[in-house]
Structure formats: C-alpha cells, structure tokens
Image (tube, rainbow, N blue to C red):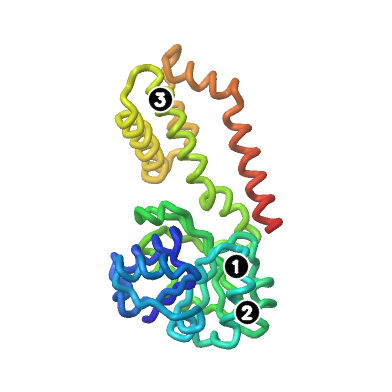
C-alpha cells in the first residue's frame, strides 16, 4: 500500500508518524510533498520517507492520497494534480468547509473521495476523526482508510450534514480544552502551586475525566454528581461555573465554530 501526503505540516506530520509507528506502511511506501522545501526535508530526515519534487509526483505515487493542506490552498493543489489522479486511487481530504460536491466540481471527473476532519491529539495517537465518503467509495475502500487512520485516531463514519459539527466538537475543541487546562493551572499557581506541577495536575484531571466518560458509559452529568457531595467544595465550584455561564460560553463558541466552518 503506497500512501501519499500533500502537505506535511503539524497535522500531516502527526498523521504520518501514526501511520508509520503502527506499521501501516514502511517509510519507503510513504511519499510527501510540501510547498515549503525546508518542512519537507525535515520530515524526510525525521521519518525516512520519500520526498517528492512536486505534488504531481506524490499524486502519481499514491494508492491513498491525503490532501493535508489548509482550506485556502485546496483549489490550487487540485488544479495541479487534477490530471494525475484517477479512480484507481482513494483521495482523503481534511479541510473544513470543503464539501464532497465542491471537491467533485473542482476535480471535474469521477473519483473516490473521503472527506474527513481529524484533530491535533493525533500527535499523541489519541485523535478523533469524522469520515464521510462520496458515492464512488466502496465499503472496502472505507475499511482501508479507517485501518490506515487507526494508527493515530479513532474514526466514525457520519453523514456529511454533520461534518461542520465534527469540526466544532472534535476538530477545534482541543483548543477549548487547552484553555480550560491553562485556566485551572493559572488558578492553582495563584494559590501557590508551582507552574509545572499545576499543569500536570490539571491535565491529568482532564485526561482521567475523559477516560471515565468513555470507559464507564455513564452520562457526564451522572459522573459530575458523583463528585458533588452535599454542601461540599465541588458543588460550590460548580455553582460559580454556572453563575459565570460556562455552559453557555461553550455552547455559543461551538455554534460560532460550526457557522464559520459552513461559511468557508
């Protein structure tokens, strides 16, 4: 299986690391290209992958081709590789707002395209990825791509009408969580805890709490109630979070994120 990446920045690099570390292909079966020659050379030295001279070479090489560039570069990249790609390949996109219909119009011919939305926890092999195939993608094709991506992420097949929601709830949400961790750590520092220790306590609390949701199957509200003893410290903190509008702030932030994704 030959895998290609057009774009090898933070997201593309994380995905490539996960694919190689999990043995989904060898470095000589993975080719990348990037507009920044310095970034491409760094990935080649770091992982031992093949470095293409241009995007056309990567497109011609790959059985599965990931378009891992920012949304504003999709049109120019597609123009460059349009005549090179074919129905023998599977194309995987990661750009918010770029619909399957838009992609089909840009390529101007029938292709197998899977629209996805990964997130940065792929860098530590704990990613979450929504996936949506077009009508040319077979069940076998989907399993091939899901297997490749399992090296860095959990995957779920969803309807395209939910892709912008995926952007808000998992694609962009690591930023919200980082802000929460930072705020908790700042508060701990204000009360005398050393900075490095504060980040460890806050981050591990978030990690453990998320694991409880996933592994117990309990509703988050039920798990919250388990911590809130009558008249205790936790319910007092929860009262203040409710007073300050934490839920509303998160709700409105995600609504804004979905709107921005749909408008891109």
User: Residue 149, relative to residue 59: is it above or below?
Assistant: above
Return the residue at label 3. 227
Q: Do tag 3 and tag 2 residues touch (Cβ < 8 Å)? A: no
| Disc 3/disc 1 C-alpha distance (Å) | 47 Å
| x, y percent for residue 143 | 43, 73
Q: Is residue 164 shown left or right of residue 7?
A: right
Q: Do tag 1 and tag 2 residues touch (Cβ < 8 Å)? A: no
Q: Earlier in the sequence, mark 3 or mark 2?
A: 2
User: Residue 72, relative to residue 174: is it above or below?
Assistant: below
Identify the residue at horizontal 59%, vertical 87% (top origin). Answer: 83
Q: Earlier in the sequence, mark 1 or mark 2?
A: 1
Q: Indicate the secondary structure of the residue bearing disc 3.
A: helix
Q: Is residue 137 shown left or right of residue 184?
A: right
Of badges 3 and 2, the one in the foreground is: 2
| x, y percent for residue 79 | 62, 79
Residue lying at the far front in this picture: please name it: 38
Return the residue at label 2. 79
Identify the residue at horizontal 60%, vertical 63% (top origin). Answer: 71
| Disc 1/disc 2 C-alpha distance (Å) | 10 Å
Q: Indicate the secondary structure of the residue bearing disc 2.
A: helix
| x, y percent for residue 7 | 48, 68
Considering the image in quadrants, where does the N terminus appear? bottom left
Identify the residue at horizontal 40%, vertical 56% (top origin). Answer: 122
Q: Earlier in the sequence, mark 3 or mark 1?
A: 1
Return the residue at label 1. 73
| x, y percent for residue 40 | 41, 69
Considering the image in quadrants, where does the C terminus appear? bottom right
Q: Indicate the secondary structure of the residue bearing disc 1.
A: helix
Q: Residue 51, located in which quarter of the rendered image?
A: bottom left
Identify the residue at horizontal 61%, vertical 52% (top origin). Answer: 165
């Amino acid at each position: 299986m030959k895998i290609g990446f057009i774009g090898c920045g933070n997201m593309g690099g994380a995905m490539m690391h996960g694919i190689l570390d999990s043995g989904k292909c060898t470095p000589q079966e993975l080719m990348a290209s990037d507009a920044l020659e310095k970034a491409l050379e760094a990935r080649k030295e770091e992982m031992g992958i093949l470095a293409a001279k241009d995007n056309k070479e990567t497109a011609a090489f790959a059985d599965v081709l990931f378009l891992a560039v920012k949304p504003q570069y999709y049109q120019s990249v597609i123009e460059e590789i349009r005549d090179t790609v074919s129905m023998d390949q599977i194309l995987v996109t990661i750009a918010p707002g770029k619909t399957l219909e838009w992609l089909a119009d840009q390529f101007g011919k029938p292709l197998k395209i899977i629209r996805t939305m990964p997130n940065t926890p792929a860098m530590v092999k704990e990613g979450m990825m929504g996936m949506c195939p077009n009508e040319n993608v077979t069940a076998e094709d989907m399993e091939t791509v899901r297997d490749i991506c399992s090296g860095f992420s959990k995957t779920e097949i969803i309807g395209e009408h939910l892709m912008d929601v995926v952007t808000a709830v998992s694609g962009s949400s690591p930023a919200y969580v980082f802000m929460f961790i930072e705020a908790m750590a700042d508060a701990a520092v204000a009360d005398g805890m050393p900075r490095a220790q504060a980040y460890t306590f806050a981050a591990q609390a978030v990690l453990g709490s998320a694991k409880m949701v996933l592994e117990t199957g309990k509703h988050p509200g039920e798990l919250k109630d388990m911590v809130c003893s009558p008249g205790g410290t936790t319910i007092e903190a929860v009262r203040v979070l409710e007073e300050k509008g934490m839920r509303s702030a998160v709700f409105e932030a995600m609504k804004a994120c979905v709107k921005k994704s749909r408008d891109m």
